[in-house]
Image (tube, rainbow, N blue to C red):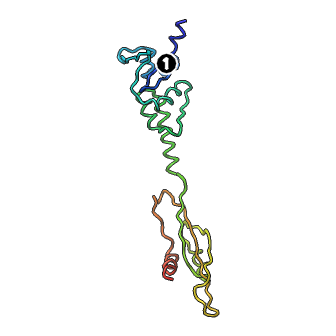
Amino acid sequence: GSGGAARWVRLNVGGTYFVTTRQTLGREPKSFLCRLCCQEDPELDSDKDETGAYLIDRDPTYFGPILNYLRHGKLIITKELAEEGVLEEAEFYNIASLVRLVKERIRDNENRTSQGPVKHVYRVLQCQEEELTQMVSTMSDGWKFEQLISIGSSYNYGNEDQAEFLCVVSRELNNSTNGIVIEPSEKAKILQERGSRM
């Protein structure tokens, strides 16, 4: 009968149709949607389109998570959608519990991204065999020895055969340094300069 039809509500959000029930929209009694569709609040005098759907001039992309939240109480935001966009709509529709949830989600994400993926800085230092141990032992804070590449010897005077190496070191770029690379220790610097002069 007509009772069944009355339960269903059509919403035309920015040109996209959503069909839901009055019961779903009534879950948040203070919300704009409940006042509009369940209480038919005269203050909210919304126009209906030719199909009888309530016209709401908002972004339909972000209406999905809002409606789903009213349906099942969970906040589900797909990767394509920005939390800020959902927050904007949650505030517009006046769904306080959802506003709280989205704000928490945004805060969590900020905390997570601030720790973010670990970036590494790599350095290649050129040095001779006898300097290797010295250099590796004097590497400063956070520099880690990655790889040693032998590049043969630089000069051959009989026994004075000095093997040359490229030494690859890396360190994590912590956010605490905000992208400022802490220089390797003085010794490593001198070796680097010597390496670049050869």
Return the residue nearer the eye: 11 or 161.
Answer: 11
**Rendered view: 36 above or below 141:** above
* Amino acid marked by disc 1: Gly
Residue 118 location, quadrant: bottom right
Residue 153 location, quadrant: bottom right
Q: How many marks?
A: 1
Look at mark 1 in the image and give the residue it sits on: 26
Q: Quadrant of the N terminus?
A: top right
Which residue extends farthest front?
50
Residue at x 44% of width, y 21% of height: 33
Return the residue nearer the eye: 68 or 116.
Answer: 68
Crowd tier of the residue under label 1, counting other residues whose Cα lies within 10 Å: few below 14, some 14–19, many 20 or above: some
Residue 28 location in percent, x, y? 48, 22
Return the residue nearer the eye: 138 or 121.
Answer: 121
Which residue extends farthest top?
1
Residue at x 54% of width, y 72% of height: 124
**Rendered view: 74 above or below 153:** above
Q: Is residue 20 left or right of residue 147?
A: left
Residue 108 location in percent, x, y? 51, 42
**Rendered view: 186 above or below 121:** below
Residue 128 location in percent, x, y? 58, 82
Residue 120 location, quadrant: bottom right
**Rendered view: 71 above or below 156:** above
Residue at x 55% of width, y 30% of height: 74
Residue at x 47% of width, y 60% of height: 177
Q: Is residue 35 visible?
A: no
Return the residue nearer the eye: 72 or 1.
Answer: 1
Q: Is residue 146 left or right of residue 42?
A: right
Secondary structure beneath label 1:
loop
